[in-house]
Structures are given as C-alpha cells and as structure tokens.
C-alpha cells in the first residue's frame, strides 16, 4: 500500500510550519491502522507511507478505515487544515533487503496512487481479483492505464466509498475521447434511415483522422439508437468527455443536418450548427464539422485531404445503404443486397475505391459466417481489395479490407503489414486492431495479441467479435475470471443478442461445467432461432456437449447433419470439435487438413482443452506447418 498526502508540497511553499504540523498529525493518525490489519510499515518517504500486508483484503480494509477516519476528522475543518490522502494498493512479488522492499510491485503501487481521487483508494486488477465478492463496497473499473516504465497497461479499479456515493460512476474522462451518437432520421421517408446511419459512420471515420482524438466506433455507438438515456450516463459508459448528437432530414436532393457538441459533465453545448445543403455538399459538411470539433477541443486543425472518392451523389448514397446493411444483424440477404449496391455504385463510378473495399469486406463476412464457401473470399474478395488499394493507396478502408483477405489466406505477416497501414491513416480503426490481434495470436500466441484486442475494445467497447477474440486469449492465458467478467458484462449490455450466450456456453464447456454450458446454448438457440448460421454453430456446440456427456449417438447424428451442409467450410468447422471429443482422430485430422487447405480453420484449435489430443498427435505439426503457425 502506498499513501500520499494531497497538497502537501503546495502548502509547504506557502506555510512550511503549518505543513510540518499537518504532516506530523497525519503520521500520528494513520500509523495505528497498520498493525490492526496485520500491516508492516516499511518506510516513510516525506509525506508518503509504504506498507506491506499479509493479504490484499487486509490492505484494502486498512485503506478504507484510514479514509473513513480522515473523512470524519476533516468534516467541518477549514480547507487548509484538512488531512487528505490518496491511496494505491497493488499485489505482487517484492524483494526484502535490509528492512526495505524492492521490485516492480512497489513501483506499481506508487504509480497508481495518483490515479485515486482526493480521499480515495485505487487498486490494481490483481487486488480486485482477490477481494471481489469479499468486500462490502463496490469497485469501479477505470479502464486500463499506462504506467511509467511498464510495457503493458494495467487495469485500475476505484473503491466507491459510501460518502462518495454521489460520485459513483463518475470517472476522470480522457479529454480526447469522443462519441458521435446515432443521428436521428427525421426525413419524411422512413426508409431513408440508412442515410442518417451512414452519415453517422462517415462522421466517425472523418473524426477518427483528427490527430490525438479517440473516437468510439460505430458498432458500440449503434447500441444507443432509439434509447432514452441521459448524455451523462452514456458518457460514463463509453468513458468519453464529449458527445456529438443531432438529426438528419433528407428530402429529394436536399438535406438538413443539425448537430451539437456537448460536454456531458455540464450538458453545456460547446457549439451547434445547422446545414441546409444539396446532397452534393455532403463531403464539405463532413470536413467542416471535423474542423469545428477540432477547434472546440483545441486540437490541431484537420488536414484537408479529399475523401469523397466519387463525385456521383447517387453512387455515394448506394454506398451508404450498402455499408448500413453490413452493420445490420448478419444475414445472407443483407450481405447479398450490400454486394449488389456496392456493385451498382461502381457501375456509376468505376473509380469509387471505398465501394471496392466494401465488396471485399462483404465477401469476407459471407465466407467467415458460412453463408458462402470460404474460397469465395479469395476468389471474389481479393480482386476488389486490390482494386481499392490501387485507386486509393492512402485510404484506411482499402488496407483493412486487404488485411482481411490476407487473414483468410493465412498470410499473417501481410495481415500485420496491412493492418498497420490502415492504422497509419486512421489510428481509431478498431477493426484494424482486432485483425492485427488475430494475426499476432496466430504467430506469437495470446499474450502478444492481448494489447491489440484490448485497444480495439477501448475504441469499440461493445464489439461482439472483439470480445469473443479477447475471451479466448484470456482463457488461453488462464485468466478465466477476466473472461467470465467480460462475457457477463456483454450479456447484460446485449440481453436480446444470441452471441454473448454462445460465448458463455463455450466458456462453461471450456471449464467443464456442461450443465451451465447447455443452459446458455439453449438460450443462444432461442434468441437466434430465425438465423441459419446460428442453427449451424448451435449444432456444432450441441454435438460437442453430447460427446462430452457420453451421448455418442446424438453427437454422431449432428456430425451427419453438418457433413451434409452445402457450404463445405461451415460443415467442416462444425464437425471438427465433435470428432475430436468423440476420439475420432483420423476423421478429425481429415477435417483439419481440409480446413487448412481452404483457410477456414480457427485459432482455438491451439488452446481449447478438447483439442489437446489432436495437439499431441504428430499430424498437428504438419497442420501448423501448412498454415504457417508455430506448433506450440
């Protein structure tokens, strides 16, 4: 535990005698608390204490008692006479030498203490893991923080003290984090909602290029569509310090866009603007808005580089509609319609790079979801991605599309290269960090990928795909508590979405709690009963659970069903885990090698426990060599 007096240095300069008196009072007041909680005072460092405890829980209880005592002491005192502390608690190994302690754990404790509010307590995730459900008062995550001289970010929690209950949920926000709320469609034609959603995404993309700004991704923003939530609550959930909201009215070839930039803490409007323009002016409006945001947030002025890769307004509206469909709940009709619209946009303007990138992404989604054979990603998606880069080599969308194509080809070094290029042109592209993480996990393992996945999640906190990737990485590293916490939070945020239930079912199957796994699988199937890809993935997980529970006949019936699917990649992906658990290793390797041929294998093969017998088989090294990953 590291404690530090607030304002001591400033008081020393102003009134040294009073500062010394307050310092002595502070030492006399808090020293008796250490032995009460089995703590050992290591040393004092000016106005700070370093204390070692036998357990994390004892340390946090001691911190709480100290702050409660000081809160009561300070009540009614003048500001200059108050004894105010910040306290940081960390759990880790230390080296004892000559009645002192050394090591990274000491450094971490001292560096998280300044993150606590005045009169507050901050703890690291290591402490949180030890005391959750054992301590009476809640702990609020402040997110992952950079600490001096540490290579990786550390997740920090704030102890919510009873007398601070009015500030519960209030966080010290990053002043450069901003969210663009879904623009309200007030057009006379309800079907023009795609235009409002499309303009929302375009503003997000435009603002993402502002140097120094961190912009929340579209996936997370759209969770607030049609929700009646206070701006302050949304800001706390997304950890942003500014919010843009507004509306769009489209009528014929005219549009009206109304926007305001809001400070959630005060709900003050930092600026507001109305735009009555022709549709052809949409790009100029986007640039003007970006400049206004930069000015309001005191950022460097937006670098004006043209992004309107088509002068054809109809082609652009087709592009917006197609992009909207890619973000709707996944379905074959949505993806197919998006492809048709992207193609129509290109027919109108053969140099529309972003539409080519859209085609590549649509084929990637069709192949990975099992709606089309995986080979179509390379056959149809790759030429479109190549054309996008040829037309717009400085466009992030073109490079992220190409990185997805390389991912489907198991060309992981090229995936990393293209994802990094995308991030050069748009450092807020959550999708690029996710793709980068997948490639890093494939080549170097989950520890190398964690940072990329977590960065992606910071930019897109409700992305179901990134959450699924991060959960696998956490579990592969033995961080099961983090995995479960993330899945449970996701299920609370998406109560009617089937995907979190699938994640929970896999989690419990991984941890051999087959009854709970079945409960969540049943809920997954119930929530997604109208989606064919859920029937396929549900059949695979159900067959695997049957195999684990010794129901061989039922498991083999589902293998027969999956082998009969007309999409080869979907069938192979579904059969593989069932065959592995049934012990049919020859058939399992036939599946695995064919998945390697077409690029449709999943990284979970390296980590999930039920694939362990396959990993011990000499044929697994052949598979790894084939797809270009290390065998261990």
Image (cartoon, rainbow, N blue to C red):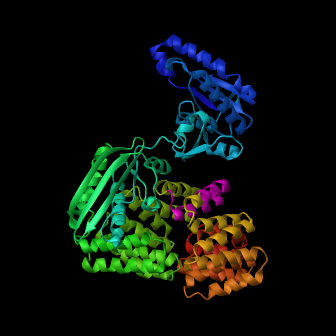
Going 34% across and 78% down the picture, which residue do you hit? Answer: 341
* Residue 583 vertical position relative to residue 34 in the rendered view, above or below: below
Residue at position x 61%, y 21% in the image: 73
- 463 above or below 541? above
Q: Residue furthest right?
A: 550
Give the camera-side residue of 424 and 278.
Answer: 278
Q: Point out the residue furthest to the front here.
A: 188
Q: Residue sitting at 27 percent across and 81 percent down?
A: 347
Q: Which residues are magenta?
A: 461-489
Q: Position of residue 539 (x, y in %)?
A: 65, 79
Answer above or below: position of 20 versus 488: above
- Asked whether residue 619 appears in the rendered view, the answer is no
In the rendered image, residue 190, in percent from the top left (x then y), is placed at: 35, 71
Q: Position of residue 359 (x, y in %)?
A: 38, 76
Image quarter for residue 345? bottom left
Q: Residue at x 33, y 70 (%)?
A: 192
Q: Position of residue 4 (x, y in %)?
A: 57, 27
């Amino acid at each position: 535990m590291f404690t530090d007096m607030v304002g001591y240095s400033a008081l020393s300069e102003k009134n040294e005698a009073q500062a010394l008196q307050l310092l002595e009072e502070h030492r006399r007041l808090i020293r008796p608390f250490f032995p009460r909680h089995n703590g050992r005072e290591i040393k004092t460092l000016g106005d700070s204490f370093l204390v070692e405890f036998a357990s994390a829980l004892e340390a946090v209880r001691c911190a709480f008692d100290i702050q409660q005592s000081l809160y009561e002491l300070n009540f009614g005192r003048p500001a200059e006479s108050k004894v105010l502390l910040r306290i940081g608690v960390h759990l880790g190994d230390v080296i004892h030498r000559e009645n002192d302690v050394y090591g990274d754990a000491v450094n971490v404790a001292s560096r998280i203490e300044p993150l606590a509010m005045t009169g507050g307590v901050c703890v690291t995730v290591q402490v949180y893991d030890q005391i959750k459900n054992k301590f009476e008062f809640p702990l609020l995550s402040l997110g992952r923080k950079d600490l001096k001289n540490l290579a990786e970010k550390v997740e920090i929690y704030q102890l919510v003290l009873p007398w601070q209950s009015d500030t519960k949920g209030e966080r010290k926000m990053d002043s450069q984090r901003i969210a663009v709320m879904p623009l309200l469609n007030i057009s006379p034609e309800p079907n023009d909602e795609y235009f409002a959603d499309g303009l929302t995404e375009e503003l997000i993309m435009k603002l993402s290029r502002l140097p120094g700004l961190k912009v929340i991704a579209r996936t997370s923003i759209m969770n607030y569509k049609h929700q009646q939530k206070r701006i302050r609550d949304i800001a706390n959930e997304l950890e942003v310090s500014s919010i843009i909201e507004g509306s769009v009215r489209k009528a014929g070839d005219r549009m009206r866009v109304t926007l305001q930039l809001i400070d959630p803490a005060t709900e003050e409007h930092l600026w507001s603007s109305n735009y009555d323009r022709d549709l052809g002016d949409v790009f100029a409006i986007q640039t003007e808005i970006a400049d206004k945001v930069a000015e309001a947030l005191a950022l460097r002025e937006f670098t004006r580089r043209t992004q309107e890769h088509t002068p054809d307004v109809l082609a652009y509206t087709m592009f917006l509609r197609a992009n909207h469909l890619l973000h709707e709940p996944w379905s074959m009709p949505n993806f197919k319609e998006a492809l048709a619209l992207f193609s129509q946009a290109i027919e109108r303007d053969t140099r529309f790079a972003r539409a080519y990138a859209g085609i590549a992404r649509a084929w990637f989604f069709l192949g990975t979801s099992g709606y089309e054979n995986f080979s179509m990603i390379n056959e149809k998606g790759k030429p479109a991605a190549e054309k996008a880069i040829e037309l717009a080599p400085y466009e992030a969308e073109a490079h992220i599309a190409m990185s997805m194509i390389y991912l489907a080809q198991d060309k992981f070094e090229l995936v990393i290269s293209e994802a990094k290029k995308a991030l050069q042109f748009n450092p807020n592209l959550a999708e690029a960090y996710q793709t980068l993480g997948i490639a890093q996990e494939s080549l170097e393992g989950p520890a190398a990928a964690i940072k990329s996945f977590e960065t992606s999640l910071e930019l897109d906190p409700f992305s179901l795909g990134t959450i699924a990737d991060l959960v696998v990485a956490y579990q592969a590293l033995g961080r099961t508590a983090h995995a479960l916490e993330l899945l449970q939070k996701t299920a609370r945020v998406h109560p009617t979405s089937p995907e979190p239930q699938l994640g929970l079912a896999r989690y419990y199957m991984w941890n051999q709690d087959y009854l709970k796994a079945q409960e969540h699988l049943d809920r997954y199937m119930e929530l997604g009963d109208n989606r064919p890809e859920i029937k396929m993935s549900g059949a695979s997980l159900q067959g695997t659970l049957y195999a684990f529970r010794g129901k061989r006949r039922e498991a083999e019936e589902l293998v027969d069903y999956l082998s009969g699917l007309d999409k080869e990649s979907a069938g192979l992906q579904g059969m593989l885990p069932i065959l592995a658990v049934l012990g049919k290793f020859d058939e399992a390797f036939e599946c695995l090698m064919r998945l390697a041929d077409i690029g449709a294998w999943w990284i979970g093969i390296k980590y999930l426990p039920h694939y362990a017998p396959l990993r011990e088989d000499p044929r697994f090294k052949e598979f790894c060599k084939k797809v270009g990953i290390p065998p261990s």
